[in-house]
Image: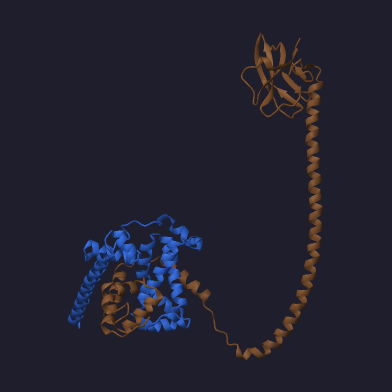
Chain colours: A brown, B blue
């Protein structure tokens, strides 16, 4: 962009009318605008004077509104300065002998480098092996913990079933579900009812088996028999006269769908 | 007031004492600007240090023919502060925690502590506001005229009238000071 006096975007009149001097002072102008303005100011004594007065007035105003920073700040600043002070080293005299030392140092460094690479590879191989062994250990440990859990569970059921007070009652399927078979273990002393539902034919996702106790003609919920379980504890009901299994909607029902009774057994 | 150009040459040569002198003379004015812009003591203190560190680093690029040292320093302070306000850097809050911890109690300043003094107070309120926005808040002319809800042209004339009045006020001060000196001598 040409910078002669008359036909630039920035002529003196425009500068004064659009407040370019103060915007320049404040740092609002882009670097190219600033450069252009600086060139124009340089050639115009009136603009120079105006700008200098403006600088002076802004500075006075800022001083009138000065706020003293805490004194520690200066100490901090000066100590940060010391860290940034970079002394100038003259290299010329030290250069020649430096070259010899550098050559030796480079050779030694290279030797170290080769050895390091070899060692590094060795270490990596060993680390890989260690990791493999650790992974195997981890798998074995997990397996063992699973076995322990299973064993604990089996022992619990075994003890409950073999308690002398436990009565075994078999629920056979009626004509609606002839192949159905569930075994219930009842202990009136410990108030326990456990059911082995493995023999019940599987149901679809929309239906569940539900267990009921008949108490004086009223059917009381003992719980939904969860799918895919063998042994499950159910709700013990006092004075139950019989156990009854019905097919209900998934999640169970408040009262039994009597037409869907597939099995029952009488308690003595 | 020591010779600025001389001081800056010394700073360029790595003379920390020269920066120390500039700090003594100008830190208050710059701090007053920075703290009014960001309204947070801890951040303002860090920014003040950053400003002088930058002055230290860039002393070589100050050109006395283009203007006064203080104008140059003001721009550095303003740019650092505006950048920090736009992109707060986590470093500033956590660097040198000891300073930050002491200042936590008085972190956000009240309007009262930041009120303006001196000749600017003699201006009419809209003139005063205009100068305050562009100088002490770091707004551009565009941002400021929107803030005051007046057309850009009107706002620019506020600034110019304010500057004119300040000039008259300071000239009078200079004249009276001169008179006083004449009386004493």
Residue A22 position by quadrant: bottom left
Residue occupying the point 43% across, 71% down = B51
In the foreground, A97 or A184:
A184
Q: Residue at x 40, y 70 (%)?
A: B77
Count of numbered circles in the view: 0
Q: Judge by depth and name the residue closer to the eye, B74 or B7.
A: B74
Q: Is residue A52 left or right of residue B172?
A: right
Residue A171: percent from the left, percent from the top?
A: 77, 17
Looking at the picture, tell me which residue is in the foreground, A9 or B114.
A9
**Where does residue B151 sit, x and y in percent of width and height?**
27, 62
In this picture, residue B105 sits left or right of residue A83: left
Whether residue A12 is visible to the viewer of this picture, yes or no, is: yes
| A16 relative to A178 in the view: left or right | left
Q: Quadrant of the C terminus of chain A?
A: top right
Q: Position of residue A134 (x, y in %)?
A: 79, 52
> Residue at 28% across / 59% down in the picture?
B148
Image quadrant where residue A235 sits: top right
User: For the N terminus of chain A, which image quadrant?
Assistant: bottom left
Q: Tell me residue A30's x, y (percent).
A: 39, 73
**Observer-nearest of B124 and A46:** A46
**Residue at the image point whose x is 46% and y is 71% from the top:** A77
Considering only vertical position in the picture, is B92 above or below A42? above
Q: Residue furthest top?
A: A216
Quarter of the view holding residue B123: bottom left
Res. B3 in view: no
Specify whether A139 is left or right of A59. Answer: right
């Amino acid at each position: 962009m040409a910078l002669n006096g008359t036909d630039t975007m920035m002529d003196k009149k425009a500068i004064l009318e659009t407040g370019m001097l103060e915007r320049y002072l404040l740092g609002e102008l882009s670097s190219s605008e600033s450069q252009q303005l600086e060139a124009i100011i340089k050639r115009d004594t009136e603009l120079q004077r105006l700008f200098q007065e403006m600088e002076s007035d802004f500075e006075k105003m800022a001083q009138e509104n000065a706020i003293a920073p805490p004194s520690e700040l200066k100490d901090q600043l000066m100590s940060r300065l010391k860290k940034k002070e970079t002394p100038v080293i003259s290299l010329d005299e030290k250069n020649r002998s430096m070259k010899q030392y550098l050559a030796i140092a480079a050779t030694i460094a290279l030797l170290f480098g080769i050895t390091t690479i070899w060692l590094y590879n060795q270490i990596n191989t060993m680390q890989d092996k260690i990791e493999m062994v650790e992974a195997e250990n981890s798998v074995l440990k997990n397996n063992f913990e699973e076995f322990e859990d299973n064993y604990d569970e089996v022992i619990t059921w075994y003890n409950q079933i073999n308690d002398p007070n436990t009565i075994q009652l078999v629920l056979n399927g009626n004509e609606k579900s002839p192949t159905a078979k569930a075994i219930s273990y009842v202990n009136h002393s410990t108030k326990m009812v456990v059911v082995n539902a493995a023999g019940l034919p599987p149901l679809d996702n929309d239906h569940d088996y539900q267990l009921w106790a008949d108490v004086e003609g009223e059917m009381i919920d003992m719980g939904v028999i969860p799918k895919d379980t063998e042994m499950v504890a159910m709700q013990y009901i006092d004075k139950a006269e019989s156990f009854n299994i019905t097919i209900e909607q998934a999640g169970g029902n408040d009262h039994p769908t009597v037409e869907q009774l597939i099995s029952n057994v009488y308690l003595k | 007031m020591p010779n600025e150009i001389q001081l800056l040459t010394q700073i360029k040569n790595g003379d920390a004492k020269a920066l120390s002198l500039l700090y003594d003379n100008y830190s208050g004015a710059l701090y007053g600007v920075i703290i009014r812009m960001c309204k947070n003591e801890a951040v303002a203190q860090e920014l003040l240090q950053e400003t002088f560190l930058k002055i230290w680093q860039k002393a070589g690029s100050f050109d006395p023919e283009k203007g006064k040292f203080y104008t140059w320093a003001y721009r550095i302070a303003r740019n650092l502060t505006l950048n920090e306000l736009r992109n707060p850097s986590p470093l500033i809050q956590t660097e040198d925690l000891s300073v930050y911890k002491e200042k936590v109690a008085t972190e956000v300043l009240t309007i009262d502590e930041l009120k303006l003094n001196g000749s600017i107070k003699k201006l009419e309120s809209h003139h005063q506001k205009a100068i305050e926005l562009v100088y002490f808040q770091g707004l551009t002319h565009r941002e400021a005229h929107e803030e005051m809800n007046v057309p850009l042209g009107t706002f620019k004339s506020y600034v110019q009238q304010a500057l004119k009045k300040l000039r008259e006020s300071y000239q009078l001060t200079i004249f009276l000071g001169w008179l006083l000196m004449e009386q004493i001598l």
